[in-house]
Image (tube, helix red, strand yellow):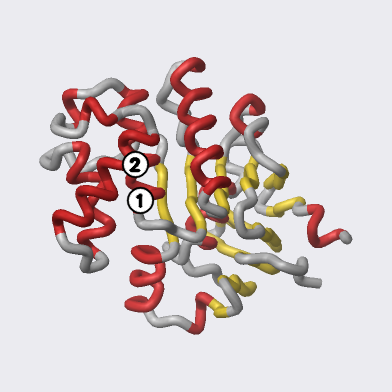
């Protein structure tokens, strides 16, 4: 049974790479404004689940429904547009564009969605201030610390007012102090905007910032929402 009020729901996902099953009947859900930590050991299928939920990878079997629409029924162009408009992404190493300033990096998703430069950069500057890194606006990613760069990446993920942010090991490259501040800022900002967060991590201290944990083991996701 699909959990009531869910924004994003995956049911019975299966994905195999060659002869290796990455997902073997995984189910998952997240509500608007909810932070869900996807946990499990290395190789358990956490990142594959996240990539399927975001429409980057197509599962071999199962369904993924976002806001009442099934992702597999969308064209590649529609899924790409969805990732630009409704989804935000934070990766372990930030993956900022090195040739652009931090301000331009945060403004980039807005520019790709047709927002004029001045308006996009005004929004970007507000998010840099909110993430406490307004002082690096004119610097390039190679000129800032890892903690600053990851806050810029969080600002970029949230600047376009997404409905869901996918964060894949967002603190994995940071020390504990910077990691905790990034998680505080990410979760506080997302909740204030009613943005759902799907957080992949293997660290209990990071998962502690979530509202609920989903454990992935051997390609199966134990989501208690499907047990009620």
Q: Which mark is residue 159?
A: 1
- 118 with respect to 208 (left or right): left
Q: Position of residue 65 (x, y in %)?
A: 60, 73
- 131 with respect to 25 (left or right): left
Q: Which mark is residue 127?
A: 2
Q: Is residue 163 above or below residue 218?
A: below
Query: Residue 188 lies in what quarter of the image?
Result: top right
Q: Residue furthest right?
A: 228
The residue that appears at 49% across and 38% down in the rendered structure is 186
Q: Position of residue 17 (x, y in %)?
A: 50, 59
Classify 10 Å Cα crowding around label 1: few (below 14), some (14-19), many (20 and above): many
Q: Position of residue 68 (x, y in %)?
A: 60, 78
Measure the C-alpha gap from mark 1 to mark 2. Answer: 6 Å
The residue that appears at 36% across and 24% down in the rendered structure is 147
Asked whether the viewer can see residue 93, the reply is: no
Residue closest to the eye, 148 or 172: 148
Name the secondary structure under disc 2. helix
Q: Residue furthest left?
A: 99
Name the secondary structure under disc 1. helix
The residue that appears at 40% across and 73% down in the rendered structure is 79
The residue that appears at 35% across and 70% down in the rendered structure is 80
């Amino acid at each position: 049974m699909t959990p009531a009020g869910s924004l994003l729901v995956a049911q019975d996902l299966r994905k195999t790479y060659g002869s290796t099953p990455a997902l073997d009947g995984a189910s998952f859900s997240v509500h608007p404004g909810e932070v869900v930590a996807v946990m499990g050991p290395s190789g358990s299928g956490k990142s594959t689940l996240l990539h399927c939920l975001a429409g980057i990878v197509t599962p071999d079997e199962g369904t993924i429904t976002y806001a009442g629409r099934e992702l597999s029924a969308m064209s590649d162009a529609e899924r790409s547009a969805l990732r630009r408009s409704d989804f935000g992404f934070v990766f372990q190493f930030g993956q900022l564009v090195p040739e652009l300033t931090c301000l331009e990096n945060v403004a980039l998703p807005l520019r790709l969605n047709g927002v004029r430069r001045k308006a996009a950069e005004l929004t970007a500057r507000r998010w840099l201030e909110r993430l406490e890194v307004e002082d690096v606006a004119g610097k390039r990613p190679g000129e800032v610390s890892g903690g600053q760069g990851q806050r810029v990446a969080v600002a970029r993920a949230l600047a376009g007012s997404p409905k869901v942010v996918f964060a894949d090991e967002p603190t994995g490259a940071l020390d504990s102090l910077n990691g905790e501040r990034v998680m505080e800022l990410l979760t506080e900002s997302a909740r204030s905007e009613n943005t759902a967060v799907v957080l992949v991590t293997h660290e209990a201290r990071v998962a502690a910032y979530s509202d609920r944990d989903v454990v992935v083991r051997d390609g199966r996701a134990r989501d208690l929402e499907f047990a009620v």
